[in-house]
Amino acid sequence: MASRDVAFWKEAINDEMDSILSNQTWELVDLPSGSKPIGCKWVFRRKYHTDGMIQTFKARLVAKGFKQREGIDYFDTYAPVARTTSIRILFALASIHNLSVHQMDVKMAFLNGDLNEEVYMEQPEVSKLSRFISNPSVEHWKVIARVLGYLKNTKELSLQYSKFPAILEGYSDASWISSVRDNLSTIGWVFTLGGGAVSWGSKKQTCISHTTMETEFIALAATGKEAEWLRDLMMDIPFTANNVSTVSIHCDSQATLARAYSGVYNGKSRHISIRHEYVRQLIRYGIFSISFVRSSGNLADPFTKPLTRDLVRITSRGMGLKLLK
């Protein structure tokens, strides 16, 4: 709102909101009878227009905690929109190859779907602080103030890409048992291309790890999955397909690196053995390779744990966050 383009932003926002309201696209309603939501009291019901008549969807979308049964009364749903990661990849490639970028939008495209079902969905919960929104403590308010301070002091930064390096690189990290409430660890990854981050993630593990090596290995498997997707995407782009090589992933755990290149896994935990075999296959097929990096140089570090101010600045610069030009 402080930019010179504020008038155009407001015009676009108002135009979008007017189209949603005038077409009665969403309706806030109670949950369907028989549903048992977890931490959600309301849902949206989407409507759309066809031939001048308002149609409503009549099928249910499975949601966590609801009573729909697989194969009977719910189905997979997909949104025909571009993944933000794909857009960042294209921006990075445009910078590397000195290309011009043209952007267009189709207004109200989401209202043109030929659907005849009713879909219920939850309002988003956006993350970690929201878990305590119903009963925040003093410590939570302090963290909120810290988040707001971070946003205020970094609002002049932007994600910028350059010509080099022209290869895709990844970083993997994990913080063992970062949540004392459930003993679950946090994993994180980030991929860079053209000197800037194109993909990143931070997730709480769904299974309990018994050692730091297990935690790091789960993070490495998740990073490998993203590396495989990014590599396949770049191979689908004509002028980069022949230049896509093995993705180099940097990990700050020597034990995890050694285990990844080991042909034998002696552990008894099935959730680790499956990931071990998956990582081995990615290495064997040339999807990615793993190299060691010190924690101070691991760009995925801020996605798993709090860091000092100096380390935040170092990793931010490594991910291409720079002052607006």
Image: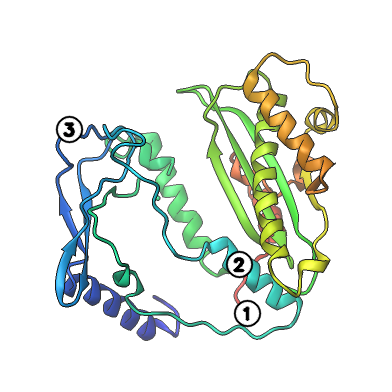
At a point 46% along the width and 50% down the height, the residue shown is: 147
Amino acid type at mark 3: Gly
Badge 2 density bin: few <14, some 14–19, many ≥20, Cα 10 Å: some
Q: Nearer the viewer, mark 2 or mark 3?
A: 3
Name the residue carrying label 3.
34
Name the residue carrying label 2.
88
Q: Position of residue 18 (x, y in %)?
A: 22, 76
Amino acid type at mark 1: Lys
Name the residue carrying label 1.
325
Amino acid type at mark 2: Arg
Gap between marks 1 and 2, in whole Å?
A: 19 Å
**Do the CB atoms of the residues marked 1 and 2 lie less than 8 Å apart?**
no
Give the structural element (helix, strand or loop) at label 3: loop
Give the structural element (helix, strand or loop) at label 1: loop
Q: Position of residue 294 (x, y in %)?
A: 81, 41
Coloration of the structure image: rainbow
Quarter-of-image position of residue 16: bottom left
**Of label 2 and label 3, which has the lower sequence position?**
3
| Location of residue 74 with respect to 194 vertically, above or below | above
In the drawing, does residue 39 fall left or right of residue 289? left
At a point 65% along the width and 32% down the height, the residue shown is: 218
Using the image as rendered, state which of residue 320 and residue 192 is in the foreground.
Answer: 192
| Location of residue 204 with respect to 184 vertically, above or below | below
Using the image as rendered, state which of residue 171 and residue 262 is in the foreground.
Answer: 262
Badge 1 density bin: few <14, some 14–19, many ≥20, Cα 10 Å: few
Q: Nearer the viewer, mark 3 or mark 1?
A: 3
**Looking at the rendering, in which quadrant would you find the N terminus?**
bottom left
Badge 3 density bin: few <14, some 14–19, many ≥20, Cα 10 Å: few
**Of label 3 and label 1, which has the lower sequence position?**
3
At a point 61% along the width and 52% down the height, the residue shown is: 200
Q: Position of residue 300 (x, y in %)?
A: 67, 46
